[in-house]
Image (tube, grey):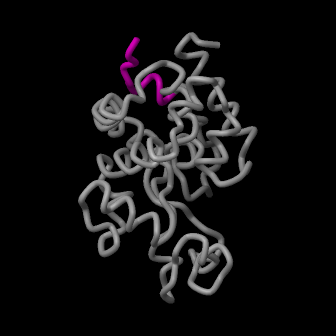
Amino acid sequence: MSVNIDFELLNHIALHFKNPKSKMTKQHQIYNIRHLVAPLNLRLKQYNIDTPLRVAHFLAQACCETFQYSALTEYPAHGGKEYDAGTKIGRKLGNNLKGDGPRYIGRGLLHLTGRFNYQLMGKRINIDLINEPTLVASDLNIAVRTACEYWTMRSCNLDADRDQFDAIMVKINGGTYGREERLNALNRAKKYLKIL
């Protein structure tokens, strides 16, 4: 059974902000939720992320990676310098030039991060993301497409079919950061899709 993505589904998965000092505002969140519907419906079907369980896992991870769908660009504590060339995480991400950390911060629906990943994903979708990294956040079609490519590269559909939450979380996030938030988002998605 294929899942139709609509505003109500995304809105149900997301938590809504009450802190007026937050960088992420309700206006950003509602805008993104509304405008993500079309590219999600197009791309999820193309990448066979199309069963209720696959969709629930994908949207839950995306929700938490994007601060409840409010920001398609991350806000690292040091502006991305913590990912720069010469740092341990920078080396892991393929950031080999000074300035790569801030230039290739997390963007998109699953926050593509690091020169290596931007270069790889650019080749996979035939778009120059090395010279135009902001496209991953500013073009919602690219934001969704890069997320679907990454999901597929990491064989997350297989994990979703087995409901392997932790395996997916580690593949997407590299660890267990935000585990409770991600699990709660997954449970909201499952409840809405009537699989919980």
| Position of residue 160 measured from the top left corner of the image (x, y, whole percent) | 57, 28
Of 97 and 109, the residue lying toward us: 97
Residue at horizontal 50%, vertical 55%?
Answer: 111
Q: Is residue 65 left or right of residue 107?
A: right
**Quadrant that contains the C terminus:** top right
Of 110 and 150, the residue lying toward us: 150
**Quadrant that contains the N terminus:** top left
| Position of residue 101 measured from the top left corner of the image (x, y, whole percent) | 53, 77
Q: Which of the 4 image quadrants contains residue 159?
A: top right
Residue at horizontal 64%, vertical 49%?
Answer: 19
Outermost residue, left side: 126
Q: Is residue 146 above or below residue 114?
A: above
Q: Which of the 4 image quadrants contains residue 78?
A: bottom right
Q: Which residues are magenta?
A: 1-11
Q: Is residue 134 left or right of residue 113?
A: left
| Position of residue 103 measured from the top left corner of the image (x, y, whole percent) | 45, 76
What is the tally of numbered marks visible in this picture? 0
Outermost residue, bottom side: 98
| Position of residue 20 measured from the top left corner of the image (x, y, whole percent) | 60, 52
Residue at horizontal 38%, vertical 68%?
Answer: 119
Residue 32 belongs to magenta span: no
